[in-house]
Image: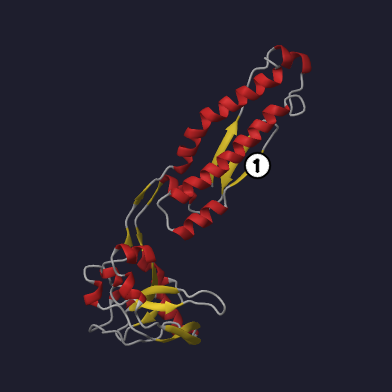
């Protein structure tokens, strides 16, 4: 869990000696100031998350977990229980996405036993526009999902097999489980394919090669399209490695910026309460 916490202390001198009770009924303005600062801190943290170098789905998921609460009359906490909050702040190690082949029920096999997944990738319209490809992409004959069927997990699919089964495929506990436990059925989309962006049209933009346009319009709504490429993640591929990411230190940014503002707000509240 990543936490932002404020613990406020102050010296009320003779006032404290007289009352012997310091709580929000005695200093309501300070209580209000702590509450306002805490709520603003949560908002600032969410803002930093949305401005961070993260994919949009992770930003939304992370920001939604930022909560604040009063822990006393003059203390409060802002916290997040997002499971990746600490590594976003402190840094992420390199990750091999091919490890998904060990656990995904969507995995298939080539005729020589190599495991692979077909990975759909949505392409951003702004990225297409920046590459000068949006016009030709928009003009493509649309592909459609016509229904959904099922197939056996780990099924053998013709995919330009190499000779011989790889060592990793032979030793895979996933494949041995398929053989011992029988077929595990998974859902599979059925497609009617339209045109795709040719290599010549994509030019140097390799990420756009083979891209399909899908009609995502809804009845009674406006026309809309999405653009998808489909890539093969093969177990013996050298790619699919996410490099290590440095820490983004979002919590430190928020607390560093808020601390002087918070102390000024608390001092002002006390001064106004004491009438001096």
Residue 9 visible in the shown view: no
Could you tell me which residue is drawn at 37 percent across and 63 percent down?
126
Residue 57, horizontal then vertical, whole percent: 48, 60
Q: Residue under circle 1?
A: 69
Q: With respect to residue 270, does 36 lie above or below?
A: below
Q: Quadrant of residue 32?
A: top right
Residue 203, horizontal then vertical, whole percent: 22, 71
Left or right: residue 268 versus residue 19 is left
The answer to which of 268 and 231 lies nearer the viewer is 268
Could you tell me which residue is drawn at 32 percent across and 66 percent down?
240
Q: With respect to residue 232, does 263 lie above or below?
A: above
- Give the SS element for disc 1: strand
Left or right: residue 138 versus residue 256 is left
The answer to which of 2 and 256 lies nearer the viewer is 256
Q: Quadrant of residue 22?
A: top right
Q: With respect to residue 40, does 96 lie above or below?
A: below
Could you tell me which residue is drawn at 78 percent across and 17 percent down?
19
Q: Residue furthest top?
A: 14
The quadrant of the picture occupied by the C terminus is top right
State the scheme by which the image is colored: secondary structure
Left or right: residue 197 versus residue 173 is left
Could you tell me which residue is drawn at 43 percent across and 58 percent down?
55
Residue 35 visible in the shown view: yes
Residue 132, horizontal then vertical, whole percent: 28, 66
Q: How many residues crowd around disc 1 within 10 Å: few (fewer than 14), some, or many (20 or more)?
A: some
């Amino acid at each position: 869990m990543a936490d932002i916490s404020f613990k406020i202390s102050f010296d009320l001198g003779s006032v404290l000696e007289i009352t012997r009770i310091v709580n929000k009924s005695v200093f309501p303005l300070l209580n209000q100031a702590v509450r306002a600062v805490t709520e603003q801190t949560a908002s600032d943290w969410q803002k930093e998350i949305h401005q961070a170098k993260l994919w949009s789905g992770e930003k939304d998921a992370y920001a939604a977990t930022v909560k604040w609460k009063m822990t006393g009359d003059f203390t409060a906490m802002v916290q997040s229980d997002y499971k990746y909050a600490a590594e976003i702040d402190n840094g992420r190690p390199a990750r091999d996405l091919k490890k998904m082949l060990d656990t995904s029920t969507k995995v298939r096999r080539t005729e020589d036993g190599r495991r692979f997944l077909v990975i759909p990738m949505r392409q951003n319209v702004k990225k297409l526009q920046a590459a000068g490809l949006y016009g030709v992409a928009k003009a493509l004959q649309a592909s459609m999902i016509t229904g959904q069927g099922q197939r056996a997990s780990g099924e053998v699919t013709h995919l330009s097999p190499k000779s011989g089964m790889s060592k990793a495929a032979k030793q895979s506990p996933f494949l041995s489980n398929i053989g011992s436990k029988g077929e595990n059925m998974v859902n599979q989309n059925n497609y009617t394919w339209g045109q795709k962006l040719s290599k010549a049209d994509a030019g140097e933009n390799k990420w756009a090669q083979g891209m399909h346009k899908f009609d995502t319009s809804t009845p009674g709504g406006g026309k809309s399209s999405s653009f998808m490429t489909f890539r093969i993640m093969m177990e013996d591929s050298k790619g699919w490695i996410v490099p290590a990411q440095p820490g983004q230190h979002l919590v430190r940014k928020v607390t560093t910026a808020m601390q002087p503002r918070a102390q000024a707000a608390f001092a002002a509240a006390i001064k106004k309460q004491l009438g001096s």
